């Protein structure tokens, strides 16, 4: 089956729009009885065209193809989550037939543009669309790295997968937790070395320690996590607790972990301890790694390791640099460009960032970068994109999203046949995200106001941006004369308030995937001067006026005289 999905994706190279129009017809035809379809097909034009849709093996008439797509685009306006929030609220209450004909199986909860989360409906069709992409990705991995097909594979190993319930009793949780719960049967397979009970260890430090202990006692061929911050956190745990883990490998126990970790492990499922075994060969490799100093090279611990997988986009570059030393000698592959809403690009080779458009799963349109800020921008189809250009994807899925604006900036890096190859660059608008936290300008402003109220200090200007380091974090530029103690207090209050405004940010910081912000000083007038330079270079006033958040990594290093406050480099 996985082979079939990959072959169908590769076959789309011949004519991407043939694949795309069939996907659109399938999605709309499957939801004809939903309230959404009736409202947007009041004149019956879409229904008439769907009635004439060709069978799966029939050739599609070009006139029908573009008439169908044009009719759809005229009937359905572009939408953001706020436009569908009321409909989703009804679905959360259990009302059927609102956006889809299909029953809602779950809701994926993800960050919104404010402190209010988004709830993405999950249907059988959406799951099939996602599974087709997963299958294509992994089949290509197995072809390129045969030992992974039957070897030991660990993926998305950190998510505990907490679940809440909608008013109608439907599961609400993260997408990674959703798939992890459905993959727990893998715990019975020798190629999946992590017992399912590990996910019930509530203390994150203890869970990571336990994961390291179990993985060290066996072979490992492929290590995968969506976000490189998770892989780096895993490496930090190995290095920080190396001696304790070594004792565990020698004795067949948890080892000499700190008391807090041992207490959490002692209260976990007793069957976990019974599955630990002495591993003298692994102990020897770990002892050699400890003697060699940090960072540990993972291939020295797991000689069979042939592949690491995580996102490779520019926005996560702060994590990739420290990971490179750990994965020295091990190829890295980008993971699927995806979100809770949809799948976007499927990487099919090691190295680089991005992959083929997921054209067999969803219907895509694209808004050019220069049109992105317009109220009703024109859209382009997948066969009309330009290499090197940036676009915002607009997606229609089997989960009830219709012409839904993703807000992501994807760059076209080339084509495979007629299918564009796309790489994620950043989020459009004033946002920043390194580890999935998706900070917005509104959240940053809210946190700054709280810091001003608490300390009485109002900076001339301030600016927040992602920053590199052994533990990636955010740099907070404060402009003007300010005492070091006040700056640090301001930054501490800002950090706490930002965590209250954005739960993902708080979670990433609490788990160690993000370091705390580091305050930097710049002289009065420096930030304003930089804005004037950007205006002179042709950047619009709307993009730089009152700027408080920049998504560019290490943007703070480009300001003359910028320096961290003494004692503030805590990451």
Image (cartoon, rainbow, N blue to C red):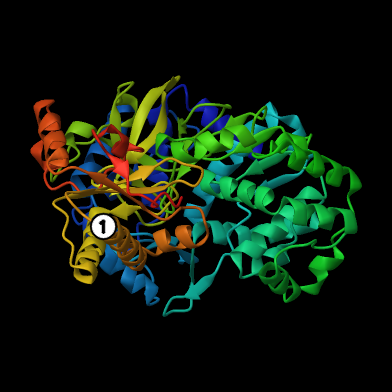
Q: How far from the left and from the top, in percent, is residue 399?
A: 41, 56
**Which of the 4 image quarters holds residue 39?**
bottom left
Q: Residue at x 20, y 65 (%)?
A: 452
Report whether residue 61 is seen: yes
Residue beneath label 1, please?
A: 444
The quarter of the picture where the N terminus appears is top right
Q: Please, is residue 303 above or below residue 362 in the view? A: above
Residue 283 located left or right of residue 500: right
* Left or right: residue 387 compared with residue 399: left
Residue 494: give x, y in percent of width and height: 30, 62
Q: Nearer the viewer, residue 328 or 23?
A: 328
The residue sitting at 63% across, 31% down in the picture is 140
Classify mark 1: helix, strand or loop. Answer: helix
Camera-side residue: 371 or 19?
371
Task: Mark yes or no: residue 5 visible.
Answer: no
Q: How many marks?
A: 1
- From the top left corner, tell me how far across and down residue 84 is, in percent: 27, 61
Image location of residue 265, percent across then percent down? 72, 70
Q: Residues within 10 Å of mark 1 (few under 14, many from 20)?
A: many
Front-lying residue, 112 or 32 = 112
Residue at 17% of width from left, 35% of height from top?
371
């Amino acid at each position: 089956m996985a082979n079939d999905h990959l072959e169908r994706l590769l076959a789309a190279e011949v004519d991407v729009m043939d694949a795309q129009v069939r996907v659109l017809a399938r999605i709309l035809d499957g939801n004809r009885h939903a309230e959404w379809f009736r409202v947007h097909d009041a004149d019956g034009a879409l229904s008439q065209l769907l009635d004439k849709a060709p069978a799966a093996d029939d050739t599609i008439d070009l006139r029908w193809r573009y008439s169908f797509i044009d009719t759809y685009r005229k009937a359905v306006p572009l939408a953001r989550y706020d436009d569908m929030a009321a409909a989703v609220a009804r679905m959360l209450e259990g009302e059927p037939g609102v956006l889809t004909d299909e029953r809602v199986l779950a809701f994926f909860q993800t960050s919104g543009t404010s402190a209010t989360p988004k709830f993405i409906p999950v249907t059988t069709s959406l799951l099939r669309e996602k599974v087709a992409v997963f299958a294509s990705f992994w089949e290509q991995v197995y072809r390129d790295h045969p030992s992974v097909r039957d070897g030991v594979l660990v993926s998305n190993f950190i998510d505990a997968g907490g679940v809440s319930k909608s008013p109608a009793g439907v599961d609400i949780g993260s997408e990674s937790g959703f798939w992890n719960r459905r993959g727990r049967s893998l715990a019975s397979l020798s190629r999946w070395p992590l017992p399912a009970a590990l996910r019930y260890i509530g203390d994150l430090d203890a869970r990571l320690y336990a994961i390291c202990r179990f993985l060290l006692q066996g072979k490992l061929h492929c290590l995968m996590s969506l976000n490189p911050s998770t892989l780096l956190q895993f490496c930090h745990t190995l290095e920080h607790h190396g001696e304790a883990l070594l004792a565990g490998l020698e004795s067949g126990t948890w080892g000499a972990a700190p008391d807090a970790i041992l207490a959490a492990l002692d209260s976990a499922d007793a069957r976990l301890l019974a599955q630990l075994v002495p591993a003298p060969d692994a102990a020897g490799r770990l002892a050699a790694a400890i003697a060699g100093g940090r960072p540990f090279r993972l291939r020295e611990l797991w000689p069979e390791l042939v592949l690491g997988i995580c996102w490779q986009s520019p926005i996560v570059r702060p994590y990739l640099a420290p990971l490179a030393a750990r994965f020295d000698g091990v190829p890295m592959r980008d993971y699927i460009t995806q979100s809770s809403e949809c799948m976007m690009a499927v990487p099919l080779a090691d190295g680089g960032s991005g992959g083929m458009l997921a054209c067999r799963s969803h219907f895509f349109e694209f808004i050019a970068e220069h049109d992105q800020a317009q109220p009703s921008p024109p859209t382009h189809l997948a066969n009309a994109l330009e290499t090197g250009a940036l676009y915002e994807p607009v997606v229609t899925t089997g989960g009830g999203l219709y012409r839904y604006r993703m807000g992501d900036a994807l760059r076209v890096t080339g084509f495979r046949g007629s299918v564009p190859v796309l790489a994620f660059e950043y989020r459009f608008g004033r946002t920043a995200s390194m580890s999935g936290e998706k900070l917005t300008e509104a959240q940053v402003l809210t946190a700054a106001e709280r810091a001003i109220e608490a300390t009485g200090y109002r900076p001339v200007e301030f600016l927040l941006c992602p920053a590199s380091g052994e533990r990636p974090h955010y740099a907070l530029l404060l402009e003007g004369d300010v005492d070091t103690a006040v700056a640090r207090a301001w930054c501490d209050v800002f950090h706490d308030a930002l965590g209250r405004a954005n739960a993902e940010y708080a979670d990433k910081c609490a788990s160690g995937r993000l370091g705390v912000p580091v305050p930097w000083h710049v002289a009065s007038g420096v930030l304003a001067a930089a804005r004037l330079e950007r205006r002179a270079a042709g950047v619009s006033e709307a993009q730089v006026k009152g700027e408080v958040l920049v998504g560019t990594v290490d943007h703070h290093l480009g300001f003359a005289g910028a320096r961290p406050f003494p004692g503030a480099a805590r990451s």
